[in-house]
């Protein structure tokens, strides 16, 4: 399918602006109840219940961290075992080459290292960061106040229920300060 | 019904049952003294070390919370205060040990001292009068510190004076230092000297960390038990359990870290002075217990405590906390008993009855202290979870 003009230059979504965190949480809840799924909320600070209100269940960073940690654990232990048993076997105080207690600290450190790195990398990847361009910044009020004192809810145009007029009417019912169209 | 009354009947019942079971078990242990004196004293020492951990650990957590603050401590504040108020019980229960050193400590034996050159030289420090004097000194310091600072904290509960709050913090910091130093010497005296040839510099800290971990586990189990009742029901947030779970994770890791550090150094040196301590604990059945502790005291609780769905669910956290209490008891047994029962894993009924007896009596005394004051501290400036209008 070829990309049309509107795919590239059309509407990204509709954005409602709120003054308080309580308003944005209840608006998000009502939008979710109305059947909207492709939406996001923006806030200058963590707001209790906001993630749950837009239907965010869980993130998978913890799984990535677990896999990273296990890789580091097996890798660290395997590296030491290979060095001490196969590559450079040395007799240290008459101990067996595979003296595993001595491997524990480095195995642990490798586990922590890979778990920590995979949490950072996994977090960035799942947030699709770094992202040099995002359409929401086309809204002037958003760009100026989203990280200071206003709360935003954006229903995206690719939501199956999205309809430019009906969604706009719906958002206006939620008592926002303003509803703006977000250009791509 | 006033809020504090709802917990009353349950507390009374718990206290009565604990006292009845405790006294019966303790009496049975005393009967054991006439059956088998040697094992009676071993059991008594084990029970004493295991249960006194709750009072000593409470003092440590109390001082720690005074210094660093935090919402976790607001929830269990009265528990730890009541825990440190039980210190006089252990000052009393230690007296028999001071008169029974010949049954427990090899360094009291002149023939042993003559045969073991190094132990003979330690006699300047390890002799009965000095040992008893030091033990008395530890208790004077702990009880004096605990009661003085607790008195200030009570005064602050009443007045909410910010200057006093600051002074409590200022006094608790050096007190925490004194606490760590005195427990260091206490555990060297009471337990490490059971094997007077052996020494490890991290051992007393390992023990102190274990005591604090045990106390945290006990306080968490108690908090979950009470959390459905007023005044806790309207106060406790999921975040409190999350914080306490994190602290339990932290002390589990610290305990494992120190235990491994001690093992690794001694194992790597493989010196005749030091390695026998581990040989005794990994031979003749003790090894099974050692492996059991490594896996069930560290590996499994560690992985479970990493997960939020365990820490944020009070019932799951309680199961884990009770499990930590059980493995702590086994760990202390693994530290104390192999000193007497060389190369053979033996458990005597007095081990169990001494533990239950002292535990029951302690629990009754603890609840008696707990009932004297309201369960929650009024005007605690460290309480931020329950303040309205905050995002978190």
Image: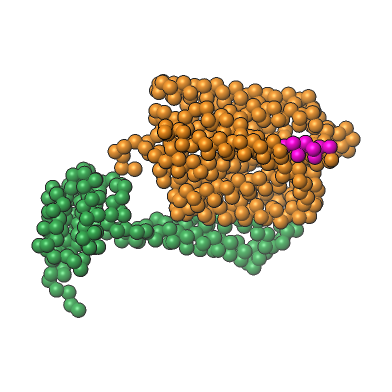
Chain colours: A green, B orange
Chief secondary structure of the magenta portion: helix
User: Nearest the camera: A116 or B149?
Assistant: B149
Image coords of residue B269 (percent x, y): 72, 49
Where residue B233 appears, as percent x and y from the top left, is 42, 41
Rendered-image quadrant of the N terminus of chain B: top left
For this rendering, which residue is in front, B178 or A41? A41
Could you tell me if residue A179 is visible in this image? no
Residue extending furthest toward the front: B1
Q: Residue at x 34, y 43 (%)?
A: B392
Which x, y percent locates residue B203? 67, 40
Whether B340 is among the magenta residues is: no
* Residue occupying image coordinates x 39% and y 61%: A60
State the image quarter where residue B333 is shown: top right
Q: How many numbered callouts?
A: 0
Q: Quadrant of residue A117?
A: bottom left
Residue drawn at x 58%, y 33% as measured from the top left:
B366
Residues drawn in magenta = B26-34
Kindly identify the residue that appears in the image at 84 percent across and 41 percent down.
B36
Left or right of B126 on screen, residue B73: left
* Residue B239 locus on image (x, y percent): 41, 44
Decide if residue B166 is on the left or right side of residue B335.
left
Seen in the picture, residue A118 relative to B130 is either above or below; the reply is below
């Amino acid at each position: 399918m070829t990309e049309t003009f509107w795919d590239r230059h059309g509407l990204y979504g509709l954005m409602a602006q709120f003054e308080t965190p309580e308003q944005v949480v209840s608006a998000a809840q009502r939008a979710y109840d109305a059947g909207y799924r492709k939406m996001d909320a923006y806030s200058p600070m963590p707001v209790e219940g906001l993630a749950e209100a837009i239907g965010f269940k869980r993130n998978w960073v913890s799984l990535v961290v677990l896999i990273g940690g296990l890789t580091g654990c097996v890798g660290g232990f395997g590296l030491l075992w290979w060095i001490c048993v196969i590559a450079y076997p040395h007799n240290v105080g008459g101990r067996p080459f595979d003296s595993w207690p001595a491997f524990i600290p480095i195995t642990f450190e490798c586990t922590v290292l890979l778990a920590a790195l995979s949490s950072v990398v996994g977090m960035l990847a799942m947030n699709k960061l770094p992202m040099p361009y995002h359409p929401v910044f086309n809204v002037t009020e958003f760009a100026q106040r989203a990280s200071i004192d206003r709360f935003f809810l954006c229903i995206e145009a690719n939501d199956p229920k999205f309809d430019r007029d009906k969604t706009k009417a719906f958002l206006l019912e939620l008592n926002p300060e303003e509803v703006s169209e977000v250009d791509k | 019904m006033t809020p504090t009354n709802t917990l009353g009947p349950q507390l009374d019942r718990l206290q009565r049952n604990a006292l009845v079971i405790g006294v019966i078990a303790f009496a049975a242990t005393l009967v054991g003294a006439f059956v088998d004196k040697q094992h009676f004293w071993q059991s008594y020492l084990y029970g004493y070390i295991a249960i006194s951990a709750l009072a000593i650990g409470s003092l440590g957590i109390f001082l720690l919370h005074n210094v660093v603050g935090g919402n976790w401590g607001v929830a269990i504040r009265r528990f730890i205060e009541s825990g440190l108020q039980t210190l006089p019980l252990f000052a009393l229960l230690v007296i028999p040990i001071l008169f029974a050193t010949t049954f427990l400590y090899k360094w009291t034996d002149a023939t042993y001292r003559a045969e073991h050159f190094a132990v003979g030289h330690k006699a300047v420090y390890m002799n009965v009068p000095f040992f008893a004097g030091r033990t008395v000194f530890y208790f004077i310091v702990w009880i004096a510190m605990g009661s003085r600072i607790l008195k200030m904290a009570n005064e602050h509960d009443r007045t909410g004076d910010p200057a006093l709050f600051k002074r409590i913090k200022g006094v608790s910091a050096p007190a925490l230092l004194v606490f760590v130093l005195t427990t260091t010497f206490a555990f060297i005296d009471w337990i490490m000297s059971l094997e007077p040839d052996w020494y490890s510099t991290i051992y007393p800290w390992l023990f102190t960390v274990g005591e604090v971990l045990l106390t945290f586990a006990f306080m968490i189990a108690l908090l979950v038990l009470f959390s459905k009742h007023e005044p806790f029901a309207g106060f406790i947030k999921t975040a409190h359990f999350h914080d306490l779970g994190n602290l339990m994770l932290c002390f589990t890791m610290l305990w494992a870290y120190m235990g491994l550090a001690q093992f690794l150094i001694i194992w790597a040196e493989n010196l005749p002075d030091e390695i026998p301590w581990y040989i005794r604990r990994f031979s003749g059945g003790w090894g099974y217990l050692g492996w059991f502790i490594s896996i069930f005291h560290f590996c499994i609780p560690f992985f479970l405590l990493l997960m939020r769905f365990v820490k944020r669910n009070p019932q799951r956290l309680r199961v884990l906390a009770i499990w930590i209490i059980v493995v702590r008891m086994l760990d202390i047994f693994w530290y104390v008993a192999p000193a007497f029962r060389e190369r053979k894993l033996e458990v005597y009924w007095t081990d169990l009855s001494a533990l239950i007896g002292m535990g029951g009596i302690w629990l009754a005394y603890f609840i008696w202290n707990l009932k004297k004051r309201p369960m929650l501290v009024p005007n605690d400036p460290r309480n931020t979870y329950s303040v309205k209008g905050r995002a978190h």
